[in-house]
Image (cartoon, rainbow, N blue to C red):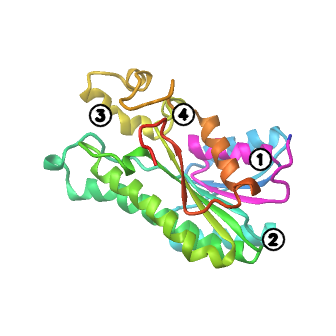
Amino acid sequence: MSQAFKQRCVVVHGGSGAIGAAVARAFAREGARVFVTGRNRARLDAVVRDMVAAGGQAEAAVVDALDEQAMLRHAAAVAERAGGIDIALNAIGVVHVQGTPLSALSLDDYFLPVHAYTRSPFLTAKAVAPHMAGRGGGVILSVSTPASRLPGPGYLGHAVACAGVEALSRHMAGELAAFNIRTVCIRSHAIPEAALGGSHSHEVFRPVAQGMGLTVEEMLAAKPAGLLVKRLPSLDQLAAAALFAASDGAGAMTGAVLNLSGGVTLD
């Protein structure tokens, strides 16, 4: 086990999901003390057992990442136990509507992902920043998708949500620079092993795939339009991007988007 992040305290919201769990395991392998949160206690406990069995340090808590007071309480409790917080990732997922055009999309279905995916990263930053500042600095990570930069049709709420996540991360870079806190957003294309391994994304993708006359498995096996690499990203690649973004080697990177879209979007 590497010790690149030894003595670092890492908080992962959405730690019971495929992406959050993969990143949490990667940080634990690198020696970090990892605190995962989510809504499913059984899945959180399974993630913690994996990390501990591999020799890592990990704890879990059921936290509603859309509840401001719950997020503040959890951050304070973690900081008290660990002496501060160094790295935080928001990787929550919510089931939302994709594949529905504007003419058929209700306001509620449009706004659900916008609300959830911009509220939770804001609350993450609000909760952890004071405890990072007390530690002398830190890194706040978030996740978006290429929809942040792509035209429709059918992804209106999701596109606005992802654009908002990236804008929030970019703006916070300036807000938090005085406290030596960096922000990086990871823009990843669909990850097949996540969708096929129980992620909420499988349910999100199903109506889109059905509209194409395909199963989710078939849709993800096909090479998406604009993909310039051989295959869609993997969980290991996303976790490696998170490790790099949080490392001292990325110390000059803030307000940035790490592009794992496979060339579907170019910066």
For mark 3, give the secondary structure: helix
Cα separation, mark 4 vs mark 2, equals 35 Å
Compared to 212, does 69 lie above or below? below
Boundaries of the magenta span: 2-30
Cα separation, mark 1 vs mark 2, equals 17 Å
Residue type at mark 4 is Pro
For mark 1, give the secondary structure: helix
Question: Which of marks 2 and 1 precedes in the sequence?
Answer: 1
Cα separation, mark 4 vs mark 3, equals 22 Å
Compared to 130, does 138 lie above or below? above
Residue 59 magenta-highlighted: no
Q: Nearer the viewer, mark 4 or mark 2?
A: 4
| 150 displayed left or right of 180 | left
Q: Residue at x 69, y 55 (%)?
A: 250
Residue that numbered label 4 is attached to: 233
Residue type at mark 1 is Ala
Residue that numbered label 1 is attached to: 28
Residue that numbered label 2 is attached to: 83
CB atoms of marks 4 and 2 within 8 Å: no
- Crowd band around label 4 with a 10 angstrom C-alpha radius: few (<14), some (14–19), many (20+): some
Q: Is residue 66 visible?
A: no
Residue nearest the viewer, comparing 145 with 212: 145
For mark 2, give the secondary structure: loop
